[in-house]
Image (spheres, rainbow, N blue to C red):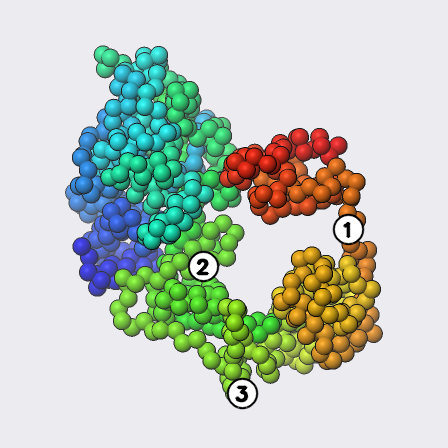
Amino acid sequence: MYTPEAQRRLFDLSKKILKDTTIPNPLEAAALSTALKEVIVYHEHRYYVLDNPIISDYEYDMLYKKLQSLETLYPNLKTLDSPTQRVSDDLTGAFQSVPHQIPMLSLDNSYNAIDLNDFDAQVKKTGLIATDVEIEYCVEPKFDGGTIVLLYENDVLIRAATRGDGKNGEEMTANARMMRSIPLGAAFSKHGIYKAELRGEALIRKDVFEKVNKKREEDGETLFANPRNAATGCLRTKHPADVAERGLEAFVYQLGYAVDKEGNNRLEKFKTHHETIALLGDLGFKIPETETKICKNIAEVSDFCNEWQEKRDRYGYEIDGMVVKVNDLATQNRCGFTSHHPRWAVAFKFKAKQATSKLLNIEYQVGKVGSVTPVAKLEPVQLAGVTVSSVSLHNEDFIRSKDLRIGDTVLVERAGDVIPYIVKAMEELRDGTEKAVEFPKFCPVNTQEKVKLVRTGTEAAWRCPNCTCGMQDMQRMIHHVSKDAMDMEGLSESTVRRFQQVGWLKNISDFYQLDYAKIAKLDGFGKRSAENIQKAVEKAKQNPIQRVLYSLCIHHLGRKVSKLLAAELGHVVELKDWDLARFTAIKDVGPVVAANVIAWFENEKNIAILKEMEVLGVNMKPTAEDAKPAVATDGVLAGKTILFTGALTQYTRETAEKAAAAAGATIASGVSAKLNILVAGEKAGSKLKKAQTLGTVQILSEQAFIDLLN
Ligand code: IVH
């Protein structure tokens, strides 16, 4: 429908409009509204018809809002074909179109407390409520799946449809009948209701989605991009059996229409939205119950929305926001509707997790063990509340597998706390000027000496085997003082760089012979900062040797193995006499890390540095913290393997694990045949199911676990 050239033009135009914050004069307004209409129609097609959007929902919403406010300012621009004059459309023409009992509108959006306050003020105005009266809201998750509209007559499901254009939907009764969470019959008549129309959302649980995609991969089928695509695809499948196989479920969130045999409105019998939802729950529908809160005012709504923004990633289903609804139905009626949305409800949209940006360049960083990491430099873009302009590309294979090219428009994602990553390049937006990536053959820092990079068998990274430029030394020193290593607060990365530049730091032993008087005189420093650095260094000298070992930057030697080794030593330098067997006799110490430690301690220069550090006062002998934890062989959990899942209410996960370990248990990392006990907290999910199917695992509640310990 759109040529590649047209797509590029519309994409660039969208970005340009989004960036422009100037207020147009009447002449510019006309041109801008034409442009906005064109790009919005394009993005709606990509989103609703192709299920393949190329801008984030947030960006789409911003375009839409821009057009809306332009049309408010200049009403003559509001043409009949404007996207604001109808609700968006997912009709493809492949299914039979059926009318809804009442139109299914969209929702207006809000993004922060200010927007919510504006909404609250609007509700009071249109709902004829005094400004000092608090309004009660019912707040539910905004499920990110496919809308379904269910029609019941005489207690039987007679029709199911998608949302379509809001007035008519696509009939998909056969598919809905395959969803176990949709009752085929429901006793509406007990409540005097003869005909009822319900709205809800069809969804696939995130863990089920993973399995569905895994199977598709095995079967050589194309993968779904996300649970929403899987759900909407499944709603419109021509093979109802797919629906059951893919585990499609449905939540209902609105009783939109309810009449008795004579056609009298039965909704009037209910006082609140929440009551209607509770009724649907009683009738056997799946409703958002524990996820919903009745808030007594808009401030509470705002807090609840923020709380969910934080925990959305831990929830079993994809949600992209919360829906805030006036709870009192009489007030809802007074507020009424615009042509686009009800005035009594608003969506609170979470910060976008995905966005597109341009891959401007790739820079190469040399790490502490010489690994060369490519880093994508992007046009800055907002993602889930932070500006992202640099994203790690991990290694050469990552770049090749995604066929990334300089100049590409790329899709970037930041899920939860996870570091942002590049999902894909938008091939359809290429214009031929994109350049293939040439991974460096030589050290990217020391460009004069041409040090050849090497890549050994199993490793994904190219490494600089023989650093002569000081880069690796610097990275090592930065690691040495970092929080998990020697933890020298006050010695930031930039301070380390600065001290290396002025020649005070060549290797890690130099940290323990800094001249504090000189530091106090250095530009940008002073007596106070010199003192702070001295304090941090003095404190670090007393560190347990597990920190010392970890601070040495031995390839693959992480905190865990550092701790295991520390527990076996009388002095750090003893490691120089250890052979491979001595290392690998320790559980969890493998031959690769062992070989690296051996090689490090064989190097005389390294031993000299350690000895110098010891002379300068750095502790090299195990402290109490390094001692092996006494295994409680007589503890109640001695010899048992235990795992915690779900949310614990009395303990944090960490303290629960500590308590279990103190009672002699080993903490498992997953459910397997070796697992003896699973402690299942609230909302335990797939791990609990798996343990139940295994049948060999003892399953305890949090309370039962505490009772056992006591
Ligand atoms: S209420 C009159 N509640 O959001 C509108 N909608 O634009 C009534 N959605 O695609 C909608 N979760 O399917 C409502 N708890 C919820 C929702 C919800 C998801 C979807 C709905 C539609 C869009 C509304």
Tell me which residue sits at (30%, 43%) in the image. Answer: 233
Q: Position of residue 407 (x, y in %)?
A: 34, 69
Question: Does the image show residue 10?
Answer: yes
Give whichever of 408, 453 is nearer the camera.
Answer: 453
Q: Residues within 10 Å of mark 2 (few under 14, many from 20)?
A: some
Kind of residue at badge 1: Pro
Q: Disc 3 designates what residue?
A: 449
Q: Disc 1 designates what residue?
A: 629
Q: Residues within 10 Å of mark 3 (few under 14, many from 20)?
A: few
Mark 1 or mark 2, whichever is nearer to me: 1
Give the mark, 1 or 3, whose residue is nearer the N terminus: 3
Tell me which residue sits at (53%, 69%) in the image. Answer: 459
- Gap between marks 2 and 3, in whole Å? 33 Å
Quarter of image, ligand 1 = top left
Tell me which residue sits at (48%, 42%) in the image. Answer: 312
Tell me which residue sits at (60%, 36%) in the image. Answer: 697
Does residue 235 sit above or below 352 in this rendering? above
Give the mark, 1 or 2, whose residue is nearer the N terminus: 2
Determine the secondary structure under disc 2.
strand
Give the mark, 2 or 3, whose residue is nearer the N terminus: 2
Kind of residue at badge 2: Tyr
Name the side, left or right, on which 506 lies relative to 11: right
Q: Quadrant of residue 499?
A: bottom right
**Mark 1 lies within 8 Å of ligand 1 (Cβ measured):** no
Give whichever of 149, 6 is nearer the camera.
Answer: 149
Kind of residue at badge 3: Glu
Does residue 565 sit above or below 660 in this rendering? below
Question: What numbered label is drawn on residue 219?
Answer: none
Q: Disc 2 designates what residue?
A: 421
Mark 1 or mark 3, whichever is nearer to me: 1
